[in-house]
Image: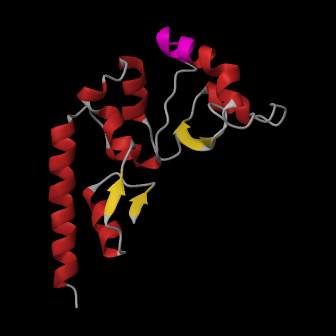
Amino acid sequence: MLAAGGVATGRHIAAAFALGAEGVWTGTPWLVTRENHTEPLLLKKLLAAGPEDTVISRADSGKTLRQIRTAWSEEWAAPDAPTPLKMPYQDILIGDLLGAIQDHNVEPLIHSPAGQGIVQFREETTVADVIRQFVADAEHALAGLRRSP
């Protein structure tokens, strides 16, 4: 069994293993790595995101996901907004528009899927450093579990 959702640190990985998972699925930590080539404007938003800066929405693809809060998510969450279409129809409807928002760096609308674990990251990093930190934090947490009575 894999643990997924909310896994952003080595402590989270250790907790997943302690609860019986055999592996983890991570997403958000990789958004702020150099290897991801995140556009500077979006990277700035991701690194500045606080615990209240992610929202659950279906406005991108019709599939529920957590993303960085922006004018896009706020407008789709407004009481008078239409209900997003089911997947894949929502993406067919607005996919080109979302691509144009990204291509032209439309600041109020540019966004990305991201979990609440984004608050763990305050500077751009590398994949190697994320993995090193995962291992160090998980080993430390698991060692603490082994010492517990």
Q: Can you say which quadrant of the picture contains the C terminus? A: bottom left
Height in image: 100 above or below 70?
above
Does 139 appear above or below 75? below
Q: Position of residue 103 (x, y in %)?
A: 48, 10
The tally of labels here is: 0
**Would residue 75 be counted in the magenta stretch?**
no
Residue at screen point 34% across, 57% down: 24
Q: State the image coordinates of residue 30 (x, y, percent, origin top left).
A: 32, 38
Residue 111 in the image: state x and y as whole percent.
51, 27
List the single residue furthest toward the right.
Answer: 80
Task: Please check the rendered image and state whether residue 105 is part of the magenta-colored stretch, yes or no.
Answer: yes
Q: Nearer the viewer, residue 32 or 53?
A: 32
Q: How is the image coloured?
A: secondary structure
Residue furthest top in the image: 104
In the image, taking residue 144 as reference, residue 16 lies left or right, namely right
Q: Image quarter for residue 146?
A: bottom left
In the image shown, does 145 or 127 lie closer to the viewer?
127
Query: Quadrant of the image for the N terminus?
Result: bottom left
Tell me where residue 128 sits by quadrant. top left
On the image, the x and y values in percent for residue 81 come to: 80, 31
The structure residue drawn at horizontal position 22% and vertical position 78%, both measured from the top left corner, is 145
What span is in magenta?
Answer: 99-107
Location of residue 143 by image quarter: bottom left
